[in-house]
Image (spheres, helix red, strand yellow):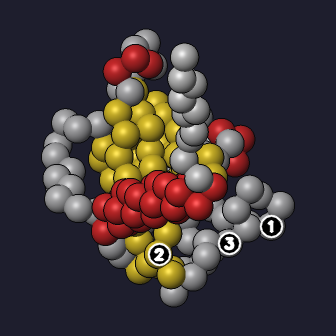
Amino acid sequence: MTTTQVTGPTPKVKMQRRLIMAAFAAAAVAAIAFGVISGGDKPELEPGAGIVELIPPEDDETFQQAPVGVQLESTYVGTIIINGTEIPADELQNPVDPESGELINARNRLVFQPGQGKVIERLRPGRNCVVVNYFPPAEPFRQRNYAWCFEVL
């Protein structure tokens, strides 16, 4: 009886395969990142899409301490993520009622003002991106997402 010895790839071949896979993975991540940052063929915001206003507007220029967020239609609530950092609800600005001067707990207004002691103390210079996740409060399974970017001077 003849015994045949089966051997796997050599260490050199294993290393080459790992390098090739790493290169493919890096290229895929770069392509996805470029698509998100450049905006790709993103559709314009349409009335009825749930979003009333982006703050600041997409591709606008602003300052490091400027407010950032979104005004949703009254039937939506949500969260915002700025440059990968989710903003806690207790750090969002609540609008003031012009007649009574009292704070309004507007769950559909997600606006964050960077500042000392907050999760983001100042926006970084250059391109900054925001993702808003929003949904009707009674139907969180109908979540929508929208991302936009702007420049900080």
Q: Which residue is mark 1?
A: 116
Q: Residues within 10 Å of mark 1 (few under 14, many from 20)?
A: few
- Residue 31 position, x and y percent, is 35, 62
- Residue 20 position, x and y percent, is 45, 60
Report, in whole angstroms, how far the alpha carbon at label 1 lies from the one at label 3.
8 Å
Residue name at image x 17 percent, y 59 percent = 41
- Residue 3 position, x and y percent, is 57, 25
User: Foreground: 14 or 93?
Assistant: 14
Q: Which residue in the rendered view is the most extreme toward the top?
A: 138
**Is 111 placed above or below 105 here?**
below
Residue flagged by tag 2: what amino acid is it?
Arg
Which of the 4 image quarters holds residue 57? bottom left
Which of the 4 image quarters holds residue 137? top left
Direction from residue 92 to residue 44 in the image, left or right: left
Residue name at image x 51 percent, y 87 percent = 153
Residue 122: assigned label:
3
Q: Earlier in the sequence, mark 1 or mark 3?
A: 1
- Residue 91 position, x and y percent, is 70, 48
Residue name at image x 50 percent, y 81 percent = 126
Query: Regarding mark 1 in the picture, which secondary structure is present there?
Result: loop
Query: Regarding mark 2 in the picture, which secondary structure is present there?
Result: strand
Q: Which residue is mark 2?
A: 127
Query: Regarding mark 3 in the picture, which secondary structure is present there?
Result: loop
Report, in whole angstroms, how far the alpha carbon at label 2 lies from the one at label 3.
13 Å
